[in-house]
Image (tube, helix red, strand yellow):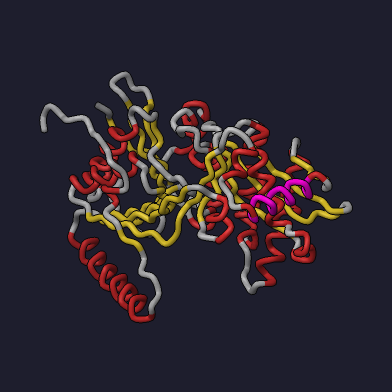
Amino acid sequence: MFTIETTSDIAELLSNADAWNRLSRGVPFRETSWLGAWWEAMNGGRQAYVLVARDSDGNMRGLLPLYQYGPGVLAMIGDGEACTDHVSVLADEADAAEVGFAMGMHLAKSASDANWGWEVIDIDGVVEGDEPMSALASGLKKGGATLHAQSRMSVWYRAADTSWDEHLKRHGKTQRRQMRRWADQLKTMEKVVATSDAEVDELLGFVIEMHQRRWVAAGEAGSFANESFRSFMIETAKQFLSRDQLYLAVLKHEGTPIAGELKFIGGNKVLYSYSAGYDINFAELEPGRLMCIDGLLEIYERGFVGLDFMRGDETYKSRYSTESHRLFRMRAVAPTLMPRLRHAAWCTGFELKQWVRRQSGRPVIVVQDPTSLATINLPVSPNA
């Protein structure tokens, strides 16, 4: 049994990084180097709303780092333009489902609380198969909350084979030939990998500049147009570097940066490909494909278990991955009258958009009960 409490004092929790990070299950986007840096740069003066699970001895056994976003709305720290994936209840594997369920029940009971009341919980970045988040949803549902989850895209993953040669065997003859050619081409280029804060500033600056130039040319603002987001990315990269969890590499052709990518290394030995940029003036060198092959080679060089391409349904991800999982945005509505009425209106609008999609021949958005994102086995309460 766990006791759940709510606090706005996130600074105290973040100050004990070791205790927090032990609950991340090895995913870097659940750790203080990511969430703490995001909170420092991106919170916009909002109030934290963190659930803490404790055992009978008072030890911290779980966290759910939310914050108050707008009147009555709770969201996950790290959301928005950061596009945080693998969002979950933070707890050890053995405890996570039980902690998640208890947190869901606690949230449902707190909905009308004078201090901690809420109307809507909006959590993006939940990966299909996440048992603790299914348990959280189950607790909310049992407490009377109304639930909805939708998916517009997937995350993509490539598990490592025993060797690069075995990896290549999974591809067709033409693809193998191309991948070998790109791997050989990489050997002719200079690759610079960040090993100091100064190099993070320099190399991430290259990646940001190339990333922005490409998106601006396509008529988009680009992720790094927001100075707060840019500051967040620089700070989180430096924090991960200090923990040997950063792989920030830039490729140069005749001394000129032509491609770069920001990757994070999980305690679970997965390499996460977060953001990349390449110089559109060197498109004939296929810099994007070179960076992709560099990441795949790196998992064999370092003995990682796989490469996570993260969110987005770009063609190259399906080409180089072996599995995909839907990425969900989960919505919970408080078990009180006005939120339910507003949710009914929201659902009407959502279904109207689905109808328009069907009529126009566009694929509808995938909808699923968030309690069924994964199969969970919860302990039976003796008082049930």
Q: Quadrant of the N terminus?
A: top left
Which residue sits furthest left? Answer: 383
Q: Is residue 315 above or below residue 145?
A: below
211 to 51, vertically: above or below? below
Q: Is residue 179 magenta?
A: yes
Which residue appears at 78% of the width and 59% of the height? 285
x 31%, y 34%: residue: 99
In the rendered structure, the answer to whether residue 140 lies left or right of residue 195 reads left
| Residue 209 seen | no
Residue 108 visible: yes
Determine which quarter of the picture holds residue 359: bottom left
Q: Is residue 294 left or right of residue 74?
A: right
Residue found at x 51% / y 60%: 313
Residue 143: where, in percent of width, then height? 19, 46
- Is residue 77 left or right of 51 when viewed as pictured? right
Magenta region, residue range: 174-186
Q: Nearer the viewer, residue 104 or 150?
A: 150
Where is residue 380? Give x, y as percent.
17, 30
Residue at left offset 64%, top offset 35%: 300
Magenta residue check for 259? no
Q: Nearer the viewer, residue 368 or 23?
A: 368
Q: Residue lying farthest front? A: 173
Extreme residue toward the bottom, this view: 360
Q: Quadrant of the C terminus?
A: top left
Q: Residue furthest top?
A: 57
Relative image position of residue 209 (x, y in whole percent): 73, 59
Main SS, magenta region, reads helix
Picture quadrant where residue 36 is located: top right
Relative side of 28 to 238, left or right: left
Q: Position of residue 155 (x, y in %)?
A: 48, 51
